[in-house]
């Protein structure tokens, strides 16, 4: 269970005001806010003479009082935007699209292929966080080869992927109650104990959030009778129609929407997946188009305990959203950094693939296919898988493969009466000149 911070009284704040002129203490508070630390990380900090951990916490709380109040229904949330948060948002504006980001480090000719791969990664990671017991390798093979999902975990991943594709097709749309229900229905299709709960708000208060290890109740969602009204307010926030007149940076606003859906917990199950999908949708709608290529859930999945703590810290510290915002901004930053590394790695690989164009009479896609066979001799592809991997039409994928068959690099072998797969031919090494020209 999370330790609650001490209740700060008026006399504590008065003392904090007197201590605010202490330069050592001011620096300490600044360092704490840069990381947006919680009480349990603050209380063990080295302290100036005659200053207690309670005094330090009072100074931290005082500094965070100069923020915004967000009211959703009868719930009040506080948000103090730190200098670190503002800097991160500015950098995301420059790099993720938004108002200022116009240049891309993703090669124009490869955007579709990278998009497919990123969407798969996001679907897999988001589902695995919620218990999808399927390996990344098996899941990617299922999505690439369009294999029908068999296990519960595969269904979760397949649903998540279909939901992402739906959002990409409707990213300019407003969020409505009906749209949220549709997202949930797509996300949970054939994965809930009661299929009637797909795309339906919960109708009682039996749902609570428990600690996965101790089974202690760590969050009791709002009464089910409040859900309609609360979701209406979330939709207004998403659509830029909130009546409070307070400006919040769009990325931070998207993070708040993510938090609120999880806080309201409007569904019997699938709340986390749905909340992350709506955040993804919001970012795309606000013009942060590079979000399409990020797998934020993969970062969150690696730090799931910190993700959960960010929720708990917010609730335990008077609904202070700063903890969740700070965590989420760090996750976006890490996802962006990983994307840059991934793209650079793929560009380096493509430089090698270009060498295969020297074979002559093949196009760039066929050169890439030959490289895949060159790197992994046991590889086999169907037309559908090449279509998915390269985000091209079925006829184009078929022409590329059949062209390589005619030139002797690969051969077609039947799997059944209606499906063929393509494997390396016996002459592959001879034709490619492995170990000689490449």
Image: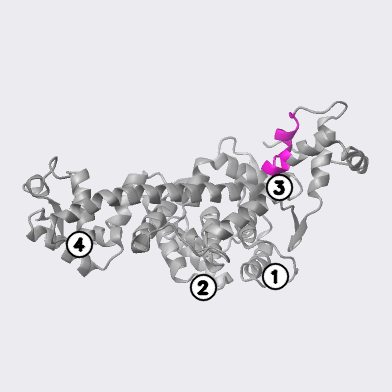
Callout 1: SS: loop
Of marks 4 and 1, the one in the foreground: 4
What residue did someone put label 1 on? Answer: 242
Q: Residue 263 occupies which quadrant of the picture?
A: bottom right
The residue lying at 58 percent from left, 66 percent from top is 99
**Alpha carbon separation for disc pair 3 and 4:** 57 Å
**Alpha carbon separation for disc pair 1 and 2:** 18 Å
Label 2 crowding class (10 Å Cα cut-off): few <14, some 14-19, many 20+?
some
Residue 143 visible in image = yes
The stretch of residues the image draws in magenta is 31-45
Residue 262 visible in image = no
**Alpha carbon separation for disc pair 1 and 3:** 23 Å
What residue did someone put label 4 on? Answer: 363
Of marks 3 and 2, the one in the foreground: 2
- Magenta region, mostly helix, strand or loop? helix
What residue did someone put label 2 on? Answer: 172
């Amino acid at each position: 269970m999370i330790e609650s911070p001490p209740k700060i009284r008026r006399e504590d704040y008065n003392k904090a005001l007197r201590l605010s002129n202490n330069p050592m203490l001011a620096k300490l508070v600044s360092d704490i806010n840069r990381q947006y630390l919680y009480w349990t990380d603050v209380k063990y900090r080295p302290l100036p003479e005659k200053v207690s951990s309670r005094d330090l916490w009072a100074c931290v709380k005082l500094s965070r009082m100069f923020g915004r109040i967000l009211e959703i229904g009868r719930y009040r949330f506080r948000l103090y935007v730190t200098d670190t948060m503002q800097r991160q948002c500015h950098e995301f504006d420059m790099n993720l699209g938004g108002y200022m980001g116009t240049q891309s480090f993703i090669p124009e000719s490869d955007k579709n292929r990278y998009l497919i791969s990123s969407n798969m990664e996001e679907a897999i990671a988001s589902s695995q966080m919620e218990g999808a017991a399927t390996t990344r390798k098996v899941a990617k093979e299922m999505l690439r080869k369009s294999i029908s999902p068999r296990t519960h975990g595969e269904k979760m991943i397949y649903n998540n992927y279909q939901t992402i594709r739906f959002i990409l097709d409707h990213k300019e749309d407003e969020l409505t109650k009906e749209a949220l229900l549709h997202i949930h229905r797509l996300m949970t299709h054939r994965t809930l104990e009661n299929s009637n709960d797909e795309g339906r708000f919960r109708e009682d208060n039996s749902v609570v959030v428990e600690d996965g290890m101790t089974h202690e109740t760590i969050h009791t969602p709002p009464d089910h009778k409040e859900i309609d009204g609360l979701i209406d307010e979330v939709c207004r926030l998403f659509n830029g129609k909130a009546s409070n007149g307070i400006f919040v940076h769009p990325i931070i606003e998207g993070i708040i929407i993510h938090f609120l859906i999880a806080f309201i917990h409007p569904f019997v199950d699938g709340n986390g997946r749905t909340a992350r999908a709506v955040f993804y949708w919001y970012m795309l709608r606000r013009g942060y188009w590079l979000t399409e290529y990020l797998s934020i859930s993969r970062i969150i999945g690696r730090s799931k305990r910190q993700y959960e703590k960010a929720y708990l810290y917010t609730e335990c510290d008077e609904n202070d959203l700063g903890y969740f915002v700070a965590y989420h901004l760090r996750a976006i930053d890490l996802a962006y950094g990983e994307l840059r590394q991934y793209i650079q790695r793929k560009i380096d690989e493509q430089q090698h693939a270009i060498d295969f164009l020297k074979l002559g009479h093949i196009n760039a896609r066929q050169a890439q296919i030959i490289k895949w066979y060159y790197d992994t001799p046991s590889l086999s592809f169907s037309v559908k898988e090449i279509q998915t991997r390269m985000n091209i039409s079925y006829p184009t994928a078929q022409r590329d493969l059949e062209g390589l068959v005619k030139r002797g690099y690969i051969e077609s072998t039947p799997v059944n009466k209606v499906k063929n797969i393509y494997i390396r031919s016996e002459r592959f090494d001879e034709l490619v000149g492995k170990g000689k020209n490449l």
